[in-house]
Image (cartoon, rainbow, N blue to C red):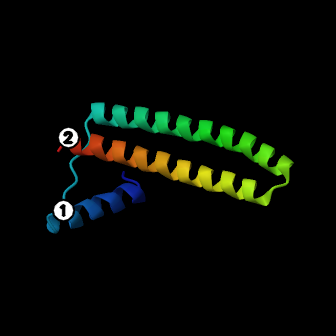
C-alpha cells in the first residue's frame, strides 16, 4: 500500500508527463555525488559559522557598531556565496545525467 506522499508524487509526475515536462531519474552515482557535495558544502557553512561567531565576539568587544555590521554583512555574503556554489554543483551533477 502506498503512502499519501507517494500517491501525490505519482499524480504530480503524471501531470508533468501530460505537459511534456519530465525529470530524468538520478542514477545511484549521481545521488552519491550529490550527497557528498551537500556534505562538503554543509561543512563549509559550519566552518564559516564558527568563524563568524569568533568575529562577532571580537566586534562586540570593540563596542563598535560599524564593526558588528561589517561582520554581519561579510557573513551573509559568504553564506550566500557558499549556498550558490552548492546549488550550482548540484545542478551540474543533475544535468550530467541528461
Q: Quadrant of the C terminus?
A: top left
Please give the residue where the numbered disc 2 appears in the rendered image: 97
Asked whether the residues under the numbered discs 2 and 1 touch, taking CB atoms below 8 Å apart as contact, a structural biologist would say no
Residue 5, x across and y down, in percent? 41, 57
Q: Of circles 2 and 1, which is in front?
A: 2
Residue 6, x across and y down, in percent? 36, 55
Q: Nearer the viewer, residue 13 or 88?
A: 88
Label 2: few (<14), some or many (≥20) within 10 Å?
Answer: few
Answer with mark 2 or mark 1, whichever residue precedes in sequence: 1
Residue drawn where x is 61% and y is 50% of the image: 75
Q: CA gap, disc 2 to disc 1?
A: 16 Å
In this rendering, is residue 46 above or below 10?
above
Residue 65 in the figure: left or right of residue 52: right
Residue drawn where x is 42% and y is 32% of the image: 36
Q: Nearer the viewer, residue 76 or 95?
A: 76
Residue 3, x across and y down, in percent? 41, 54
Please give the residue where the numbered disc 1 appears in the rendered image: 21
Residue 75 in the figure: left or right of residue 14: right
Q: Helix, strand, or loop for circle 2?
A: loop
The quadrant holding residue 49 is: top right
Q: Nearer the viewer, residue 92 or 67?
A: 67
Amino acid at each position: 500500500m502506498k503512502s499519501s506522499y507517494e500517491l501525490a508524487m505519482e499524480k504530480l509526475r503524471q501531470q508533468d508527463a501530460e505537459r511534456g515536462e519530465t525529470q530524468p531519474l538520478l542514477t545511484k552515482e549521481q545521488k552519491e555525488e550529490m550527497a557528498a557535495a551537500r556534505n562538503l558544502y554543509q561543512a563549509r557553512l559550519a566552518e564559516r559559522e564558527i568563524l563568524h561567531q569568533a568575529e562577532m565576539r571580537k566586534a562586540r568587544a570593540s563596542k563598535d557598531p560599524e564593526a558588528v555590521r561589517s561582520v554581519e554583512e561579510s557573513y551573509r555574503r559568504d553564506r550566500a556565496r557558499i549556498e550558490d556554489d552548492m546549488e550550482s554543483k548540484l545542478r551540474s551533477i543533475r544535468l550530467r545525467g541528461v
